[in-house]
Amino acid sequence: MRLNPFSRELSSADRVVPPTGFTANLTVLTAAAMAFLAVFALALSLASGRLADRWAYALARSATIRISAPPEQMEVQTRAVLDALATTPGVKSYRPLEDDEMRDLLDPWFGPDLPVEDLPLPQLVELVETAQGIDAEGLRLRLAAEAPGAVLDDHTRWRRPLVAAADKLRWLGWLSLVLIGGAMAGMITLAAQAALAANGQVIRTLRLVGAQDAFIARAFVRRFTQRGFVGAALGTGLGMGAVALLPAADAAGGFLTGLGFTGTGWLWPLALPVLAAVVAYGATRAAALRMLKGIR
C-alpha cells in the first residue's frame, strides 16, 4: 500500500522526535496527573453549583415563626399566629412543631435526654411558601399587632452566606481547572524544549537537506499532542473511577456526600482529553517555533 505524499511527510517528520525517553514519559505522566486533578476540580465546581441552587431554593421557600410568651399566653398567641397564616397570601402550608421535633433540633447541642417539656422553650411554627412567596414585612407588621411575642425568620441571614459560599466554591473549581491547564502547558513546554534541544544536531541536518521549520515543528506538535491526549485520557478514566467511589449524595450527608457527577454531568470529564490535546498543541507549537529560531 502506497502512502500519499502528506502521509509520508508526517511519517518522516515523526522520526525527528524520539518515540521513547524521559520527554515522552514526562508528557504522558503530566497530562495524566493534571487530568486526574481536573476531574476532581470539575466535580467540585459542579457539586458546588448544585449545592448553591439547592440551598437557595430550599431556604427561599421556607420560614420559621418563633413565639416567645408566658405559658398562660402561649396557646393564645400560637392560635393567633396560625389564624394569621391562614389568610396570608403566598403561604403554601404551615404547622407548629411538636415536642419530639423540638427535641430532635436540640439533640446535637444538648444530647438526647433533654427534658423539652420542662423547659420554657419558644413555640416554633414552620411555614412553606408558594412560588410567589410572602410579603415578609407585611407579615411581620401583622404579627406584631396580633401576636406580639411572634418573630418571623425568613432565613435571609442564613441563606445569603451559604449561597455565597457555595458560589465561591464553584468559581474556585473553575479557577482550579484554569490553573491545572496552565501547569500542564508549562510542563509540556519544558518537555518539548528538552526534546528539541536533544535533537539539535538532527534539526541542523534536516535544515541542510532543505527541511523547513514548519515541517520540523509539525513533528513535535503532532507527537506531543498525541502524548497529551493519551495521558489525559488515562488520568480522566482514573479520576472518574475515583469519583464514582465517593459516597452518593443524600439529604443527611449534605455537601460532603454529594461531591461527584450526576446524570449528564458524567459527560463533562470526557472533554478533558480533548482540552488537554488542545493545550499540548498550543504549548508545543509555541515552544517549537521559539526554539527553532534559536537553533542555527
Image: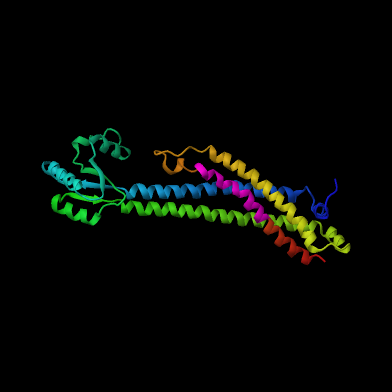
Magenta includes 156? no
Position of the C terminus, as image quadrant, is bottom right
The quadrant holding residue 234 is top right
Quarter of the view holding residue 10 = bottom right
Q: Position of residue 16 (x, y in %)?
A: 81, 54
145 versus 248 height, above or below: below
Image quarter hosting the N terminus = top right
Q: Residue at x 80, y 55 (%)?
A: 6
Q: Position of residue 182 (x, y in %)?
A: 61, 57
Give the total number of marks visible in the rendering. Answer: 0
Q: Nearer the viewer, residue 29 or 288?
A: 288
Above or below: residue 149 compared with residue 283: above
Residue 261 visible: no
**Range shown magenta:** 261-280
Describe the colour scheme in one phrase.
Answer: rainbow
Q: Is residue 186 visible?
A: yes
Measuring from the top left, give residue 266's x and y in whole percent: 54, 43
Please report the residue visible at 66 percent of the width from the left and 52 percent of the height from the top.
277
For this orientation, the residue located farthest to the right is 209
| Vertical order, 112 against 12 (above or below) | above
What is the magenta segment's predominant secondary structure? helix
Q: Which residue is drawn at the image coordinates 52% and 54% (left, top)? A: 174
Q: Position of residue 33 (x, y in %)?
A: 63, 47
Picture quadrant of residue 251: top left
